[in-house]
Amino acid sequence: MNIKSTMKKYGRRLVAKSKHSQITPHNIKFHIDELTVDKFAGWIYLQDDEQFLCCSLTLLINGKKCLDVRANQYRSDLLESGFGSGCHGFNVAVSWQDFELNKNSIEVKVGAISVYQAEILVDQKQMLVAMTKQLTGHFDEALGAITATMSDLSTSSSLKV
């Protein structure tokens, strides 16, 4: 399945042209590749005539604004499918702490326009896995900082000898 058929199936395939870069539901094209308790990834752009413009989106979980992200990461699949420069991807960490056990309402907005709404069910296992990933990331960062400091200390002490 190529990206264009994916867009038709999952994203919005609304063709309308704007002579001004106004954001309307008709000129926003997107696809959400992944939305979990720890990751939000996909692509989105604003089409203005023949231009594919980068845009920012907001993720709301249970009505609370959780993050703003600029969709400007390069993706070769978008370029190969003819979607401008291909720089319309996003892939960001989501805090598991923004979710609640059981039902969570999800909304994605571009400006004031809601482009996606869904409900996600989150169980305790998913929360624990996301929490463990986050803690492991913090431990890895701390270990890296300690290792770098120790390396700097050993280098500076060997210079004094």
Image (cartoon, rainbow, N blue to C red):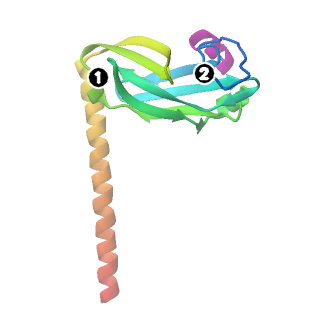
Which of the two labelled residues, at mark 2 and mark 1, occupies the earlier sequence position? 2
Report which quarter residue 4 is drawn in: top right
Type of amino acid under label 1: Phe
Tell me the magenta residue range: 2-11
User: What is the C-alpha distance between the residues marked 2 and 1?
Assistant: 29 Å
Report which quarter residue 51 is drawn in: top right
The answer to whether residue 108 is above or below residue 54 is above
Residue labelled with disc 2: 23
- Local crowd size for mark 1, using a 10 Å CA cut-off: few (<14), some (14–19), many (≥20): many
x and y percentages locating residue 133 in the rendered image: 31, 36
Secondary structure beneath label 2: loop
- Quadrant containing the C terminus is bottom left
Residue labelled with disc 1: 99
x and y percentages locating residue 26 in the rendered image: 63, 13
Type of amino acid under label 2: Ile
Residue located 31% across and 59% down the image: 145
